[in-house]
Structures are given as C-alpha cells and as structure tokens.
Amino acid sequence: MLFKRLVGVLPVIFGVLLLTFLLVHLVPGDPVEVMLGESATSADRSALRAELGLDKALPLQFADYLTKLAQGDFGVSIHSHAPISGLLAERIPATARLALLSLVIALAIGLPLGIVAALHYRRWPDRAATLSALTLSAMPHFWLGPLLMLVFALWLGWLPVSGMDNDASILLPALTLASGLAAILTRMTRASLLEVLNEDFVRTARAKGLPERTVILRHAMKAALLPVVTVIGLQLGSLLAGAVITETVFGWEGVGRLLVESIEKRDYPVTQACVLVIALTYVLVNLLTDLAYARLDPRVRFSQ
Amino acid sequence: MKHWPVTILLFWLIVAVAAPWLGFQPDAIDLDRILAVPSFQSWLGNDDLGRDIFARLIAGAEVSLTVAMLVTAATMTFGTALGLVAGYYGGWVDRVLMHVTDVFLAFPGILLAIAFAAVLGPGLNNLILALCLTSWVGYARLTRAQALSLRGRQHVLAAQVLGATTPRILFRHMLPLLMAPLLVEATFSIASLIVAEASLSFLGLGIQPPHASWGSMLRDGVRYLLVAPHYVLAAGLSLMSLVLAVNVLGDTLRDTLDVKR
C-alpha cells in the first residue's frame, strides 16, 4: 500500500513540474520583453533570454529546469538578482509559523464546536454552531481580515494592525487564515460524530455504564476523528493558498507575499518557484495524511 | 424569512441586470465627496475618489455575476463532455484525463488561477480565461465517476443493443441522469467563482481601474480602514451576502435533489 501510494505520487509531481515550467511560456508575446519592460536594450534582452535558457528548444529547457531544481537551484530573481532559493528560505519559516498556528486555532475552534453541535443535535447550540460555520465559510480572507483588523486593532486597540514587528502580530492573520478550516472542521466533526453516535459500540459503552464523558471523548471521538484527519490534510493546502491573500492583507512577509510581490514586479522565475513550492508542499502533506490515515484506521492497518 | 437566500440572490441579479437603466454613474468622480460617510445623497457613502459606493457595488455585482455565470457555462460544458467520454470509454482516455486532473488538483485552492492570471496579465478577458483553465476539473471528475457507474446500467446496455450511436447514449441516456449532481456542483461553483473573481481583483490581477469590482473595492477600502470603515464594510457585506445566499441555496438543492457529495 505504502509503496503503491509513493509510486502513484510520482506522475503527479512530474505534472506539477511540467505545468509550472510551462507557465512562463503562457505569457502572451515575448516573456523577456514583458519582464524587462519597453526601455530595455536588445542586448539586455538577449542576455536575459540566454540566462533563462529561453533561446533553447522547449524539451531542452525543461531538462535544464529539472536538473537545476534537483540541485536545489531555483534560478535567480530578475528584479534583485538574488538566488531564489535564498529568498524562499527567508520566507518559508514565516508562512510555516502562520499556517501551523492557524491549524491549531482551527482545531481549537472546530472540534469543540462540532462536538457541542452533535451532542445538541437540532437544538440551539447546534443551530448556532452550524450558522457560524456557514457564515465563516462565506467570508473570504480579504473580507474577514480587514474586519478583524477594524474591530481588534483599530476600534479596541488590542492587537497590532499589520506587519510582523510584534509577537502578537501573528494573531490576526492566523485567526483570519484559520476561519475557513475552522468552519469545515465544525461541519465535519458534527456530521462524523452524529454518524458514530448511532453505532452499536457507542450503545455498548453506554450500556456498560461508562460516564457519558468517556463514551463521547474516548469511544465515539476516536472513530469520528478518522474522516476529520483526511479533511485536515486536504485543507492544509487551502491554508497555503489562503496564505497568499492573508499575507497580502496583513503585510506578513511569507511565501504568499513573495508570490504577490513577484507578480507585481513581473519577476516570473520567482512566481514560478513560489507556485511550485506551495504545490509540492500540498502534494507532500496529502501523502503524509494518507499514510497517517492508514496508521490510525485499524481496518486499513490490519488489511495489509 | 425562509426564502432569504433566494431573495438576496434575486436582489443582486436584478440590480446587476437592470444596472444600465438605473441611471447610476459608478465611475463619476466627485472630489468634494472623497470618503464621505453615508447620507441621503449617496446611501452608502463615497470612495477615495468621491465615487458613489452604492453605484459601484451594483457595477461590481454585474461583473461578479457575469464572470461567475460565463465561466460556469463554459467549464460545465467542457468538463462534463470530457468526463462523459472518459467515463464511458475508460481505458487510456480515462487514464490520461485522470492524470491531468490529478495534476490540476495538486495546486490548492485559487493558487493555479493566480498563477495563470499572473502570466496572462490583468484584465477581464484574462481573468475569465484563468478561471476557465482551472474550474473545469471538478465537473470532469464528477461526470467521469458517475458515467463509470452508469455505463453498466440496463437502459444503457439496452440502448447499445438497439444500435444507438455513442453521442445519443452519452447525451440522451446518461446526461439526464447526471443533471441533479451537476446542478448542485454548479451552484457551489458559482459561489466559489464569485470569491475567486474578487480574490484576483483584490490582488490587482482582475478587473482594472476605473471599473468597479468587489475585490478591488475591498483592496482600496483596506487602505482607508481607519478614516472610512464604511467603504470596506459595504463591499465586504455585499460579497458575503451573495456568497452565503448561493451556498445555502446549494445546500438546499443538494438536500432536495438528494445528491451525495
């Protein structure tokens, strides 16, 4: 199972590499002209064209691209001439911190809310939790972010507006980024737990006279968490994609902000590298989730 | 009260369609009213160039709904046709399609649309193209899975035996059974396309000034958050109301049509 899953991911990685490589060739007209602007001399242009290898045949360019990537070489920024691997190394920790804290916040909100909703099925706590989840999932980051900024930074003055000079600066962007995942986790935990509560083993646990607390948290939740784990893996990717917008809203200097800056400067090699790193991280996280799922679910574990 | 999602959706649809006859001037600059607060003269106040925010919201609704519906129509047609063919024939056609969709799905959320929009350049046409390039995948996967299970059904086998042509089997005998899940998928997809359009415009990759879009209004509004919070609130609440309404409508449709996701 493990081997099959590992081999299965290879064509996807190849496809991701091919698609990101082809991105630059989708630029209408001459990418070099677009990147350098109209004031560049023709010597500058041919220099950049040679540097990016755009004067070679397409398959050769792709082979070069792969060879360099294998050596950890993402190329050079057109704007600052700095190696892109260095730029990424500077920015990745900030995004990782933001994403991890968001995950923790989303779990801290979503799981309890989902449990409470399921235990009070169709009564007011359930309705309140479901409605909040619905509302949160209809709030894109570039709307929730400014709203939180307005309330907590400008009106109440509890937290910094944006930037990353202060330890508390991470809270608003993390909360913003967590919103979507928190909403999904609430809905998933609720649905999953509702299903499990009808199972025989829950009735048995209750019949044994176990306290309700133990029945729910130790018996029911253990089974209910399985589908939730898969969702977390799938949604970590949306967290990374969401970071692009959230980091832009809050001026958080992560990979997402780097991506947007590179687009504004038409620094396509940097754009390419950011997109690639985010996609590959997503593929990797999904792979790990599948493996974790196999370890967690005894039905899968023992069938091997 | 029970019909609030339909009411909200109809409100935005009607004002978007009727916009040309309502006599609003969303691009008219009035330097005496820069960031003016809501008043009888302009119900939701004015933006950083003194333009009427309500008028611009309506123009933004027009863009938002037009983009969402155009992209949905195009990608649903393309994705469904592709999925039907792959699911019905199976074999290498199916394997190739699955590999391609796997690659597209490896780019989370809006990332690929951002990448396409970035290299294509800003503007309405490129925005639509970028969203089309990324939104067909869901329909293809959905239709393919359904077609795979439908092709063994009795009525399909009967049609084959009776000598029906393949297009007839695909479009007359299989497609009608797919309409319910496709309708639900399309509803949710409209909601996410509205968000996607606003996201790209927020990043400066979509609708270009002076034209209004909810995304670019939010971007400008954030700059004046302290002095004119009504700007961000107006654009954000509009966007949220429409997305919420379409999502709830999708949930209702899914429950009514008994579609599993």
Image (spheres, coloured by chain):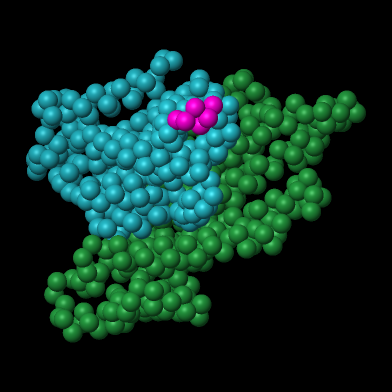
For image coordinates 23% across by 34% down, the residue present is B62
Q: Does residue A76 appear left or right of residue A42 in this picture?
A: right
Q: Is B163 part of what is drawn in magenta?
A: yes
Q: Is residue A23 above or below residue B90?
A: below
Q: Position of residue B109 (x, y in %)?
A: 45, 49
Left or right: A233 in relation to A69: right
Return the residue found at the far right.
A208
| B31 or B163: nearer the viewer | B163
Who's the residue at 51% across and 77% down the image? A70
- On the question of residue B18 being in view, the answer is yes
**Residue B203, how many percent across, how many down?**
31, 53
Look at the image and give the residue range highlighted in magenta. B158-164
Horizontal side, residue A276 vs residue A260: left or right: right
Q: At which x and y percent is residue A216?
A: 76, 33
- Residue drawn 50% across and 65% down? A14
Q: Which chain is cyan?
A: B
Q: Is residue A131 above or below residue A170?
A: above
Residue A46 sits in quarter:
bottom left
Towards the viewer: B18 or A212: B18
Which tint is chain A?
A: green
**Magenta-span inclusion, residue A247:** no
